[in-house]
Image: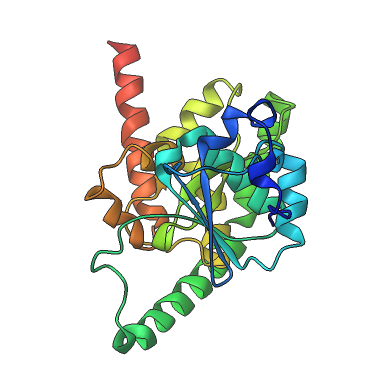
Amino acid sequence: MIPSLQNYYAVSEQQQDHRSSYCTLKWRRGQLLVKSPGIGKQPYLPTLHNKKSLVECLKHSPITLVTIDPKLGEAWLRFWAVACEQANKPIFLRIPSGNQFPKHGSSLLRGWNRLFDWFFALVLLLIISPIMLGLLLVMRIYSPESLFAREWHVGERGRLFRTIKFHTQNTGRLEAWMHKYGLQNLPQLLNVVRGDMRLIGSHCWTLEDAVQLSLEEQRLLNELPGITSGWQVSTESNLLHLDGQTM
């Protein structure tokens, strides 16, 4: 991941880039910790500012996962999240562990719950696939843009993943109708099949909202989120927005 640093202290101040101090890298048993800058000196690593180079470094490194400090801010979190996604490396927010991690005795129950969610989500996808196909055809008529939107959310134990939704912007009345009933979230059943979410669970926080949480609130990010909670919040928010326009 990191090139040879033998000549680091011989590097002149002019060759040091002050922007390289936005983070501190720490290696621990195959895990790369991306932390807020420390008080010590740091090497100049241009790779940390070039997404293509960072992706190549991650691909050819023995890193098994990346843990990143939410204090770095949303922009840098997205930068690292996209790089890890392209390098096929999982990335987690560094959050307080709290008491939310499941005990070993409940692992069997969790396994059955995951199996139930996977099976039921797969059945639902097969049942509603004609409806989803119809929505896709109508959306294609209203807007030539991408049919799906993939947004960064925070999953179990702070794991970053992309939720899959219908891209409803610029579809006029269709957008308001789909948001009213939460139909834009139907593709999230694919997230359930992949194990990113549950059918019924805690609120699914966006990356933008998660970085604003306090340390105590960040303990909520240890739980596996559910699509039902996200549906309810999204629908209520848009209903209030529509009511405000009417008034």
Q: Quadrant of residue 123?
A: bottom right
- Percent position of residue 233, x then y: 33, 41
Single out the residue that lies furthest toward the front: 10
Front position in the image: 220 or 45: 45
Q: Nearer the viewer, residue 118 or 13?
A: 13
In the figure, residue 109 lies in which quadrant?
A: bottom left
Number of callouts in the render? 0
Residue lying at 39% horizontally and 58% vertically, measured from the top left: 226
User: Where residue 225 sits in the image (x, y, percent)?
Assistant: 39, 58
Q: Quadrant of the N terminus?
A: bottom right
Residue at (68, 68) in percent of width and height: 62
Tell which of 151 and 96 is nearer to you: 96
Above or below residue 116? Residue 8 is above
Indicate the position of residue 89 as horizontal and vertical percent values. 64, 60
Structure colour scheme: rainbow
* Residue 185 in view, yes or no: yes
Eyeballing the image, is 63 above or below 221? below
Residue at the spot x=66%, y=52% of the render? Answer: 85
**Visible residue check, residue 199:** no
Viewed as shown, does residue 9 lie left or right of 214?
Answer: right
Q: Quadrant of the C terminus?
A: top left
Measuring from the top left, give residue 216's x and y in whole percent: 21, 50
Residues 98 and 239: in front is: 98
